[in-house]
Image (tube, helix red, strand yellow):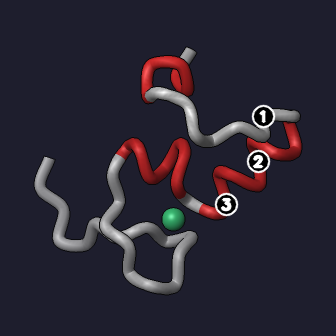
């Protein structure tokens, strides 16, 4: 899909939006994970997804 604008709308710095950013790097998603009790963001990618 071609999009003219593909920066994260949750971040003010114009961060390039990737699936990894949306699920794990974005401060908004990290706040959601913290709310659900996930606090370790330094695992291997497959462990994070699992
Ligand atoms: Zn973001």
Q: Residue at x 48, y 50 (%)?
A: 22
Pick the residue in front: 35 or 1.
35
Image x and y of residue 37, in percent: 87, 34
Q: Residue at x 52, y 54 (%)?
A: 25
Q: Residue 29 vs residue 11: left or right? A: right
Q: CA distance from mark 3 to mark 2?
A: 6 Å
Q: Residue 41 vs residue 5: left or right? A: right
Image x and y of residue 4, in percent: 17, 71
Q: CA distance from mark 3 to mark 1?
A: 14 Å
Q: CA distance from mark 2 to mark 1?
A: 9 Å
Q: Nearer the viewer, mark 2 or mark 1?
A: 1
Residues at circles 3 and 2 in contact by the CB criterion of under 8 Å: yes
Residues packed near mark 3 inside 10 Å, few (<14), some (14 to 19) or many (20 plus):
some
Image x and y of residue 26, in percent: 55, 59
What kind of element bears circle 3? helix
From the Cβ of disc 3, is ligand 1 less than 8 Å away? yes
Pick the residue in front: 49 or 22.
49
Q: Residue at x 11, y 55 (%)?
A: 2
Q: Residue 15 vs residue 47: left or right? A: left
Which residue is denoted by mark 3 in the rendering?
Answer: 28
Which residue is denoted by mark 1 in the rendering?
Answer: 38
Which quadrant, please, contains the C terminus? top right
Dot 3 or dot 1: first in sequence order is 3
What kind of element bears circle 2? helix
Pick the residue in front: 38 or 35.
38
Q: Vertical placement of 10 versus 26: above or below?
A: below
What kind of element bears circle 1? loop
Residues packed near mark 2 inside 10 Å, few (<14), some (14 to 19) or many (20 plus):
some
Residues packed near mark 1 inside 10 Å, few (<14), some (14 to 19) or many (20 plus):
few
């Amino acid at each position: 899909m071609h999009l003219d604008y593909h920066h994260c709308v949750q971040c003010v710095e114009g961060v390039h939006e990737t699936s990894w950013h949306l699920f794990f790097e974005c401060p908004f998603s990290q706040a959601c994970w913290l709310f659900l009790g996930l606090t370790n963001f330094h695992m291997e990618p497959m462990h994070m997804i699992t």
